[in-house]
Each structure stands twice: as structure tokens, then as C-alpha cells.
């Protein structure tokens, strides 16, 4: 699959087949995603790959009862070693750059998974402390996102309507339309 196709075809999937994803495939996804840019090349992202069914169910509960998540055979929890970025960039590094770094790393995971024929969903709504407890994440590391990963069980994946680029774009200053 070409990158442009992966970008256009990727959708948030909330029902997965009961089909294992090989560890080697997850490894390949992460090996590519690690090439994501980060502020100062700090690479503050860390991740916990969760295959264990019981832990996936607990993560779904911690995500405010989004139990559909448990149908995904893999969860990738993206974590943020905030202090690594804060040490270089101070408060802005802590409150912005460290989060941006994790977000782009996650976007690379989403696209690489699609490239390999897998489907995903980005989950940002969860109780951080519960996730921290479930996965033994240290206090100086913040869980930023959970990506569910597997093979879609959704019958029809509809194309999402996107706004026209002209309605989103300004030239040289806010409000100046092309």
C-alpha cells in the first residue's frame, strides 16, 4: 500500500476479529514508528504493548467503560517521559513538545499498521492513574494514548467526509482566504 492510500483509507475501528497479531508485526510497526521526529531528537516516547486479555479488559474499563477496546488483540499504550523534554525546553517542553512528540509517534503507528493491513483506533479518553496502575507505569511517566490494533470486524467501513482544504486554509495571516 502506498502512503497516500494508507492516509486516505485509515479509519478508527471499534470492532476487531478474534485473530492474533504476531509479535513480529507489532515489532515492525514500532521499528518504523521510532523514526518519527521529536523535539531535539529526544525521543521521549515509551510504549507498553499489551497482549494480555485481562489487562486489555482493564484498560477498556479505565477508558471509561469503552469495552469495545477489549476486542482488539493488541493495545499499544504510548507513554511520555516528560522530564527528558522538560530538561531541555523547560515548561514549554513539558506542556507541549513532549505531548506533540508522542502524538506524532502515535500517528506513525496508525499509518504503518494500515500499511501492513491492520486497523487501529486512537483512544485518548481514559483515567491516567488507572492505566498507570494496570501497567505499573512509574510516576515520572505519563500515559498519553492507547492505540487499539488488530484486524477489522466491521462490515462496511464508510469514507469519512472531510472539509475542503480552502475552508481550512489562510494565507499569510488568519482570515485571509486563498
Image (cartoon, rainbow, N blue to C red):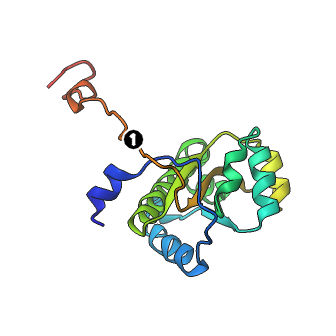
Whether residue 135 is visible here, answered yes or no, is no
Residue most extreme to the front: 155
Q: Residue at x 73, y 45 (%)?
A: 67
Q: Residue at x 62, y 72 (%)?
A: 20
Q: Residue at 20% x, 28% y: name it.
A: 166
Q: Residue furthest left?
A: 178
Quarter-of-image position of residue 36? bottom left
Q: Residue 158 at what x, y percent from top left? A: 39, 41
Question: Percent x, y for residue 113?
Answer: 46, 64
Q: Is residue 163 visible?
A: yes
Nearest to the observer: residue 46 or residue 69? 69
Residue 152 in picture, x, y percent from top left: 52, 56
Of all residues, the one furthest to the bottom in this rendering is 24
| In-front residue for pair 60/100 | 60
Q: Is residue 3 left or right of residue 22?
A: left
- The image shows residue 93, relative to residue 6, as above or below, that is above
Q: Is residue 75 left or right of residue 154?
A: right
- Residue highlighted by disc 1: 158
Q: Quadrant of the C terminus?
A: top left
Q: Residue at x 34, y 58 (%)?
A: 6
**Pointer 1: residues within 10 angstroms few (<14), some, or many (20+)?**
few
Q: Is residue 174 left or right of residue 54?
A: left
Q: Secondary structure at mark 1?
A: loop
Horizontal and vertical percent for residue 74? 64, 64
Number of dots carrying numbers: 1
Q: Image quadrant of residue 45?
A: bottom right
Question: Quadrant of the image for the N terminus?
Answer: bottom left
Amino acid at each position: 500500500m502506498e502512503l497516500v492510500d494508507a492516509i486516505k483509507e485509515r479509519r478508527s475501528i471499534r470492532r476487531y476479529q478474534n485473530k492474533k497479531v504476531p509479535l513480529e508485526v507489532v515489532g515492525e510497526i514500532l521499528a518504523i514508528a521510532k523514526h518519527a521526529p521529536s523535539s531535539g531528537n529526544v525521543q521521549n516516547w515509551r510504549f507498553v504493548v499489551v497482549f494480555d486479555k485481562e489487562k486489555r479488559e482493564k484498560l477498556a474499563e479505565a477508558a471509561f467503560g469503552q469495552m469495545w477496546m477489549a476486542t482488539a488483540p493488541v493495545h499499544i499504550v504510548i507513554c511520555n517521559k516528560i522530564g527528558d523534554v522538560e530538561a531541555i525546553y523547560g515548561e514549554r517542553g513539558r506542556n507541549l513538545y513532549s505531548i506533540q512528540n508522542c502524538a506524532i509517534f502515535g500517528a506513525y503507528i496508525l499509518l504503518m499498521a494500515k500499511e501492513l493491513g491492520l486497523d487501529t483506533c486512537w483512544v485518548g479518553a481514559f483515567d491516567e492513574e488507572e492505566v498507570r496502575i494496570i501497567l505499573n507505569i512509574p510516576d515520572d511517566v505519563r500515559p498519553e494514548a492507547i492505540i487499539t490494533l488488530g484486524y477489522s470486524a466491521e462490515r462496511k467501513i464508510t469514507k469519512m467526509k472531510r472539509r475542503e482544504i480552502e475552508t481550512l486554509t489562510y494565507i499569510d495571516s488568519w482570515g485571509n482566504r486563498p
